[in-house]
Image (cartoon, rainbow, N blue to C red):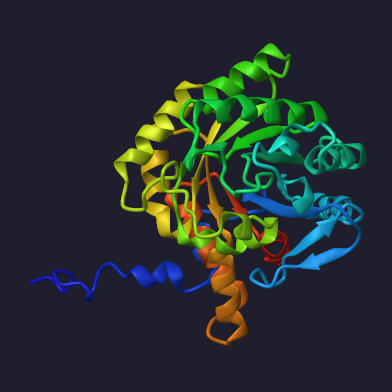
Amino acid sequence: MSKFARGPYPATRMRRVRNHAWSRRLVRENQLSTADLIWPLFVFDGPGRQGVASLPGVDRLGTDQIVGEVVRACELGIPAIAIFPATNPELKTEDAAEAINPDNLVCRTVRAVKQEVGDQIGIICDVALDPYSSHGQDGLVRNGRVLNDETIEVLCQQALVQSEAGCDIIAPSDMMDGRIGAIRKALDESGKQDVQIMSYAAKYASAFYGPFRDAVGSATNLGGAGKTTYQQDPAQSDEALHEVELDLAEGADSVMIKPGMPYLDIVQRVKETFRVPTFVYQVSGEYAMLCAADQAGMLDRRSTVLESLISMKRAGADGILTYFAAEAAGWLSEQ
């Protein structure tokens, strides 16, 4: 028998390519870069900063602070920001009229940012009524019921004032049926054909949103009410594909899945099925949990955060909304 008949065991050694950092980088299937990050920013009408207890390290930015943070985002190479308003409670009403005020906080912020940085960075604006409504729901309410079609009329007006202010991407998060088609039509008819729509196509009625509602000040307005009649049931999976399909047919340029890590199966299914620009939101509850584990000394902040973000890329996300965006961009620039 030839001495070569039996080779060393095992013949295939998977560890060979893992022995060196350069080798691991050479065969890496998924890459995370600053270009994958979208930074959500909270703004309030006033000077300075306001801390958010349930979101350690995240501040509401005063109107004198927000532009500076966007400039920093540009310097870090972050391609887009998402603006969320902490509306003055005195401006919140049953009909959420402040949402369609062309001089509201979001519109003024967009104009100020555009004046400073122009097209160096994309601006995403949330379209929903919860930051402006006294009841905290994403739509108009009558007799305890969130109205669909009547809400869409207001959402179209909200999208128009935001686009007039200079918003690049309209991001409807309300989950009303048919709102993408209506908003697309309204934008096109007003000459805003180039404004993109990033649909919150698969947005679940999740328990992970709590700190966000603290940040925009809608938690107290919502009280004990929920959003289960319009946001998706966490037990649903096939339904997400139906939602995405409808929004794409109505004119969405990209779609979003929210929350992130608990719904990576949805991200993967959406990307594999539709092959369209697919985004995911690492929501406030996810951020808060990772921060709490870091503060307790249970996990290493940098490695855990980056691992959580690469898991979303691995699932198929083209981009990630995350409160870690600036921090992660700094880490990635060091690698």
Q: Residue furthest front?
A: 143
Q: Camera-side residue: 138 or 57?
A: 138
Q: Is residue 185 visible?
A: yes
State which quadrant residue 157 falls in.
top right
Question: Which x, y percent locates residue 289?
Answer: 54, 72
Q: Residue furthest bottom?
A: 297
At horizontal 81% and vertical 49% (from top left) the residue drawn is 74
State which quadrant residue 125 falls in.
top right
Question: Which x, y percent locates residue 277?
Answer: 53, 36
Q: Is residue 243 left or right of residue 225?
A: left
Question: Which x, y percent locates residue 141?
Answer: 54, 39
181 lies above or below 81 = above
Q: Is residue 128 left or right of residue 97?
A: left
Which of the image's four quarters has the N terminus? Answer: bottom left
Q: Camera-side residue: 237 or 205?
A: 205
Which of the image's four quarters has the C terminus? Answer: bottom right
Q: Camera-side residue: 295 or 8?
A: 295
Question: Which x, y percent locates residue 318?
Answer: 54, 44
At horizontal 47% and vertical 48% (from top left) the residue drawn is 227
11 lies above or below 69 = below
Q: Is residue 29 visible?
A: no
At horizontal 62% and vertical 49% (from top left) the residue drawn is 36
110 lies above or below 134 = above
Count of numbered circles in the view = 0
